Amino acid sequence: MWRQRRVLAAALACCLLAGCGQPLPAEEAEPQEPIMGTIAYVPLDDRPDNLERVVYLAESLGYELTMPEKDDYQTKLLGQPLNSNGTQSGDREDLYEWVLAQEAAGCDRYVLSLDQLLSGGLVNSRSLSVHVPLYLSDGTMLTEYQAVEQLLKTLAADEKNRVWLLESVMRLAPTVGYDHWDLEGYNALRSYGMEARPHLAGEELYPENIQADYRLGRDGTPLDPAAFGLTEEEITEYLSARTRKLKLSGWVQWILNGGTADDENDYGNFRLLIGVDDSSEEDSIQKNEIAYLRQGLRKGDALLSGVDDLAFKAVTKLYLEETDWQGASVAIQYFGGMENKPACAYDYQPLTDIVEEHLDFFGLTDGTGNSTTLDVLVLTQPEDEMKKEAYCRELIEQLNENREAHIPTILIDAGNGAYGTTFHEALTQKSELGWLLSYAGFLDMAIVTGTALSHGVARYAFLQNGQSNLQTERAFIKTLADSILKDFCYKNVVRDDLLAYIRNDLSGNPDNFYQPELDLEAVQSRLEMGMEKSTEAVIKNLERSNFVSALPTRQPYAERGWCDIWLDEYSFPWNRAFEISMEIHLGPFSQPHKKFLGIYYR
């Protein structure tokens, strides 16, 4: 035993003396001009998936994002301080004029959320049941239809513009804690929305027909609001919001399809990306809406599951189109045995269908079993509860095999919490997290596929193009670190502690810190202490990792060592415990770390 220890110590000393993980020469301090140019971006709202994570992704591809003032697109829940426009929602007039100002300044790339521009954000789009005109700063009044028509015509007048419009199919129920809806009302409306409606097809699919069928069950008989614990007034308000949103979506499609007789503009450089918000696998109230919007899609448009990942998909696809992406062959491997079922109760399709639709959107072909250039590993919910450990072990073994073979890999955790912290702990102990192209598992299952594939395909295509510089690499590191740290450490560890602390110790509401008003300093302190403890092992793994810095398409395969990571500036978007924002700080990159007895050393 003593002799073995001496050999081990000597070998380790040699490894360390060989310069493993030494810092690279001094890095550039001055910001560099974006490789790909600037994107004018109007976010869906101010949550991290629509804000800082989009910034990271864009910068990792060589873009710079320019955005309006945050006050113009924030969402505030009941009882919280209002925006400067005196409302809980975004400022549609300011945003409209901001986009026009970007165009006047010569911008030629846009990613624009129609929910924000027309409704003041995703949440308000679910509650706005009447059409409200826009009153511009020069005194002009525009209806919502006029506003979107003029905006699109203005952007289309410059043939150099490339415009991505983000839209959503309204989810089955409004947001708890916004407007007047509480959890009881949300559950009642969700049950009402999940009821199957008569199926419409072909020429029957237009808003007035869909609206008429909102109140009918599958057999054509009226649904009784009282049977769901709802009043007629509540149902009328709910269905009016659906109708308004559907008609505005149809109007946008009509414009893009050349419906305006006096419009000589070409909308060929416009793309409409529609996301299906929280749904159900049943034939719900969304079914006819989805079918109607699918009819209006042009070549290049898409309708996919997920809403909070829309900006990820748009930025990535913009990059792919601008760099003449030729696609890639991928191998999809599922672990857990439940891939033919929806990943959660809020998906309207089986997981395999959602994956396939996203593969098609990004120009990927499933080459499983043949020669592939990219791997996608997916953990599903466990088919057999007794085999959960085996499912995790098999996936991690495959991940480590890919790492040794230098096969770029995307990892999706679609287990929806079924594995607790077991999977994350095993990944942290037995894999090299920082080597992944992308990872997703945080938040709703409906968006994990789009999130992981957006980031993974973006990174893969960027490496193929050989455009890397210091700033793009550091932005990529932030995209991956943000996703892993929030899922591993906040979602399944710190958040659970905070929920109990707020409810039991502070007698508060974790879904809204202002109803009743909490001791915000105590909550912040609890968050910081929890994150400091829970992130330690994961950060250590990342700091000992290497990341792929070159693919053999243009130059030899290469890796670089990760850097030191530290976190601060934690905050709670929307003043609730559901999610957090944080600042990710990075030290200098290092030379590639060396592996010794399965461990990467700095």
Image (cartoon, rainbow, N blue to C red):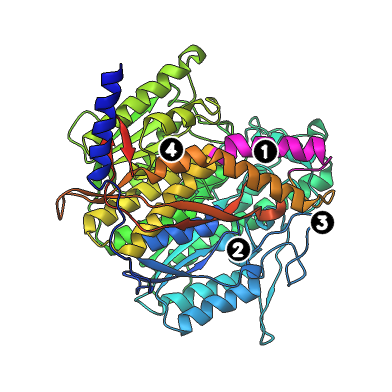
Query: Cα distance, mark 1 to mark 4?
Result: 21 Å
Q: How many marks?
A: 4
The first of marks 1 and 4 along the sequence is 1
Say whether disc 1 or disc 3 marks the residue closer to the N-terminus. Answer: 3
Along the viewing direction, whichever of 425 and 62 lies nearer the viewer: 425
Residue bearing mark 3: 79
Residue 216 vertical placement versus 126 (above, below)? above
Mark toward the viewer: 1 or 2: 2
Compared to 509, does 386 lie above or below?
above
Which residue of the protein is positioned furthest toward the top in this rendering?
386
Between discs 3 and 2, the one toward the N terminus: 3
- Report how far apart the C-alphas of labels 3 and 2 lie in the structure: 21 Å
Horizontal side, residue 87 vs residue 165: left or right: right
Query: Mark 1 sits on what residue?
Result: 193
Describe the element under mark 2 as helix, strand or loop.
Answer: helix
Q: Residue at x 27, y 46 (%)?
A: 20
Q: Which circle's residue, 4 or 2, is located before the other in the chain?
A: 2
| Element on which disc 3 rests | loop
Question: Which portion, as a residue range, is magenta?
Answer: 489-510
Magenta span contains residue 457: no
**Where is mark 2, residue-wise?**
116
Q: Are marks 1 and 2 in contact (CB under 8 Å)?
A: no
